Image: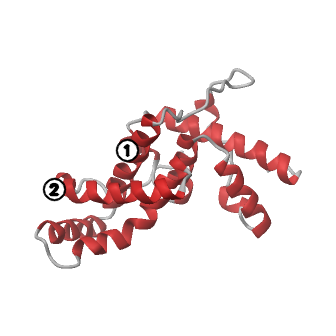
């Protein structure tokens, strides 16, 4: 299990200064926040909803919510995690309103506890070493259920720790590990069927 140390004090200081600048209505401060975190917001929302028009609208809603609730940011975690939490919450609510399931019901084939098998040694970055495999990997990720796509993105691509993901998604760490295990297992199956070699 990867556990990342708390954000460095200088990172939290920079986050706090940016938030203070926004709250004191300094020109360009909120635009700086949007520039820094629009990519993260887009990736979190897009991994959940998979529709560009909805993603665009939900990202706008996320930044509006961030602007309205920024006074609630306490600076205990990185601003990146807080922004991701807002984006995740808005995308999740969107899917719930449309009655789109966040997860698919699956059971472990061999009956072992999925939590015990989360450290399966998959290195997603190694899988993306060639352009063709990269395309297959992204297609396979797109085939995952919304919650698994998002957790996989947050953990492997955004490098957010499981503890921070638990905080921003309001899911238990064990549940996150279980979803990560299932998503990596499903990716392996999809990649084996698409490229014909064990992933």
State the residue lying farthest toward the top: 111
At horizontal 71% and vertical 50% (from top left) the residue drawn is 140
> What residue is drawn where x is 30% and y is 69%?
33
Checking the image for residue 169, the label placed there is none
Label 1 with label 2: CB-CB less than 8 Å: no
Quarter of the image that includes the N terminus: top right
Image position of 184 with respect to 111: above or below: below
Query: 10 Å neighbourhood of mark 1: few (<14), some, or many (≥20)?
Result: some
Q: Nearer the viewer, residue 49 or 69?
A: 49
Give the residue number, with chain letter if any, for mark 2. Answer: 71
- What is the residue that sits farthest to the bottom in this orientation? 27
Task: Name the side, left or right, on which 46 lies relative to 183.
Answer: left
Tell me residue 164's x, y (percent). Answer: 39, 48
Q: Residues within 10 Å of mark 2 (few under 14, many from 20)?
A: few
Front of the two marks 1 and 2: 1
Q: Percent position (x, y) of residue 40? A: 44, 62
Q: Position of residue 78 (x, y in %)?
A: 32, 59
Q: Height in image: 61 above or below 167?
A: below
Q: Which residue of the protein is positioned furthest toward the left in this rendering?
A: 24
Residue 44 appears in the picture as rendered = no
- Badge 2 marks a residue whose secondary structure is helix
Q: Quadrant of residue 125?
A: bottom right
Residue 114 relative to residue 99: left or right: right
Cα separation between marks 1 and 2: 18 Å
Q: Residue at x 44, y 54 (%)?
A: 4
The answer to whether residue 60 of the structure is visible from this angle is yes
Residue labelled with disc 1: 89
162 lies left or right of 191: left
Q: Secondary structure at mark 1?
A: helix
Report x, y in % for residue 170: 37, 37
């Amino acid at each position: 299990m990867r556990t990342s140390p708390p954000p460095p004090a200088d990172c939290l200081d920079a986050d706090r200064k940016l938030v203070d600048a926004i709250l004191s209505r300094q020109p360009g401060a909120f635009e700086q926040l949007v520039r820094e975190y629009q990519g993260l917001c887009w990736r979190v929302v897009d991994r959940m909803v998979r529709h560009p028009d909805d993603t665009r609208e939900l990202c706008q809603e996320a930044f509006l919510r961030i602007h309205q609730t920024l006074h609630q940011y306490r600076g205990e975690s990185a601003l990146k995690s807080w922004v991701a939490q807002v984006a995740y919450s808005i995308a999740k609510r969107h899917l719930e309103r449309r009655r789109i399931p966040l997860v698919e019901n699956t059971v472990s084939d061999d009956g072992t506890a999925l939590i015990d098998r989360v450290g399966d040694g998959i290195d997603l970055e190694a899988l993306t070493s060639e352009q063709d495999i990269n395309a297959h990997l992204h297609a396979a990720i797109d085939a995952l259920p919304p919650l698994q796509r998002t957790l996989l993105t947050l953990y492997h691509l955004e490098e957010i720790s499981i503890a921070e993901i638990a905080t921003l998604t309001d899911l238990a760490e064990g549940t996150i590990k279980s979803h990560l295990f299932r998503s990596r297992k499903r990716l392996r199956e999809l990649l084996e069927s698409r490229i014909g070699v064990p992933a």
